[in-house]
């Protein structure tokens, strides 16, 4: 049963005929496995947590301090949410009484070229440091208060810029250490949790979205790019992430069509890709 606070929190979803109170309660009792790199993690996670998905298991793609920071941010967004950071092979040990209801795979690699906005931010930080250095190198007793204000403003400027860019810097460094955002073994990660209903998005070019609501066929035997080596993220990757999250919610609510689907995007045009029907020789489906 939903509490009064939950009814108020999810009221905009409960009034939808497709969800209602029972659907919202089902979301709160659901368990999702999210296979994603740090660069793609938070946009989709925030949407899922805000919708009321009760538990999300995530491989430890970020250092522990950043895991705790993201978990705290998600708790502030929705106190009903629970995040579990564990490898796919181990998450069943943490939740022996409960298996995942669905999996979401977001596969991409961050682009290494800095954007113009980041270049301007770096230039602003250097300028603030230069102003501060000049102010401290030429102290003036009559302008002590002004010098202090300049120093305080420069420190605040650097603190804000560092906080805004912190996740991006840590994600990039950690990704280089591991090989890429999702990790070089995204296929083997999927092998450990298959077969469960899955939604997968390839966020390189061309963008791709696959929805697998049943055991057969799987992502591998429909030849989805989502399990291949990741390429740099496309410019409009966040749109496909939101579409993937919507498909996951439909899976968790039991609203997804029974047939699998595979879409490939060419700009704003989504092209349906034919799904192979022969799965007898697939190493996932045939086992």
Image (tube, rainbow, N blue to C red):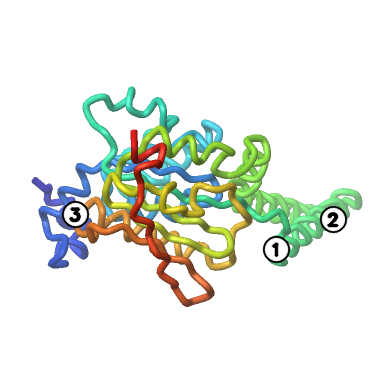
Neighbour class for label 3 at 10 Å: few (<14), some, many (≥20)?
some
Neighbour class for label 1 at 10 Å: few (<14), some, many (≥20)?
few
Residue position for label 2: 130
Residue position for label 1: 115
Quadrant for the C terminus, please.
top left
Instruction: In this rendered view, identify the residue nearer to me: 258 or 166.
Output: 258
Drawn side of residue 118 relative to residue 249, left or right: right
Quadrant for the N terminus, please.
top left
SS label for mark 3:
loop
Residue 90 visible in the snapshot: yes
Drawn side of residue 69 relative to residue 217, left or right: right
SS label for mark 1:
loop
Total marks shown come to: 3
Q: Can you tell which of label 2 and label 1 is closer to the viewer?
A: 1
Extreme residue toward the left, this view: 1
The image shows residue 100 at horizontal and vertical percentages of 29, 38
**Which of the marked residues, 2 or 3, is nearer the chain's N terminus?**
2
**Residue in the picture at 19% in, 54% down:** 254
The image shows residue 32 at horizontal and vertical percentages of 32, 43
Query: Dots 2 and 1: beta carbons under 8 Å?
Result: no
SS label for mark 2:
helix
Q: CA distance from mark 2 to mark 3?
A: 59 Å
**Residue in the picture at 23% in, 31% down:** 98
Q: Can you tell which of label 1 and label 3 is closer to the viewer?
A: 3
Residue position for label 3: 254
Q: CA distance from mark 2 to mark 1?
A: 23 Å
Residue 160 visible in the snapshot: no
Neighbour class for label 2 at 10 Å: few (<14), some, many (≥20)?
few
């Amino acid at each position: 049963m939903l509490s009064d606070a939950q009814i108020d929190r999810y009221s905009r979803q409960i009034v939808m005929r497709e969800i209602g109170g029972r659907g919202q309660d089902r979301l709160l009792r659901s368990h999702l496995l999210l296979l994603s790199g740090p660069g793609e993690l938070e946009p989709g996670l925030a949407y899922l947590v805000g919708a009321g998905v009760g538990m999300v298991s995530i491989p430890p793609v970020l250092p522990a301090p950043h895991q705790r920071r993201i978990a705290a941010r998600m708790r502030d967004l929705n106190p009903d949410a629970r995040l579990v950071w564990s490898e796919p092979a181990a998450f069943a040990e943490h939740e022996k009484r409960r298996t995942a209801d669905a999996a979401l795979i977001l596969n991409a690699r961050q682009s290494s070229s800095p954007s113009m906005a980041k270049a301007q931010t770096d230039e602003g930080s250097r300028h603030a440091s230069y102003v501060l250095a000049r102010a401290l190198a030429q102290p003036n007793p009559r302008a002590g208060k002004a010098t202090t204000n300049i120093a305080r403003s420069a420190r605040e400027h650097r603190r804000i810029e560092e906080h805004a860019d912190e996740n991006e810097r840590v994600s990039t460094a950690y990704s280089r250490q591991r090989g890429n955002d999702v990790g070089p073994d995204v296929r083997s990660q999927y092998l450990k949790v298959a077969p469960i209903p899955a939604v997968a998005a390839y966020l390189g070019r061309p963008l791709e979205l696959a929805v697998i609501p049943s055991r057969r066929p799987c992502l591998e035997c429909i030849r989805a790019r989502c399990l291949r080596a990741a390429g740099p993220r496309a410019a409009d990757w966040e749109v496909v992430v939101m579409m993937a999250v919507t498909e996951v919610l439909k899976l968790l609510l039991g609203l997804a069509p029974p047939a699998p689907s595979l879409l490939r995007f060419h700009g704003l045009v989504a092209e349906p890709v034919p799904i192979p029907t022969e799965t007898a020789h697939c190493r996932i489906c045939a086992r």
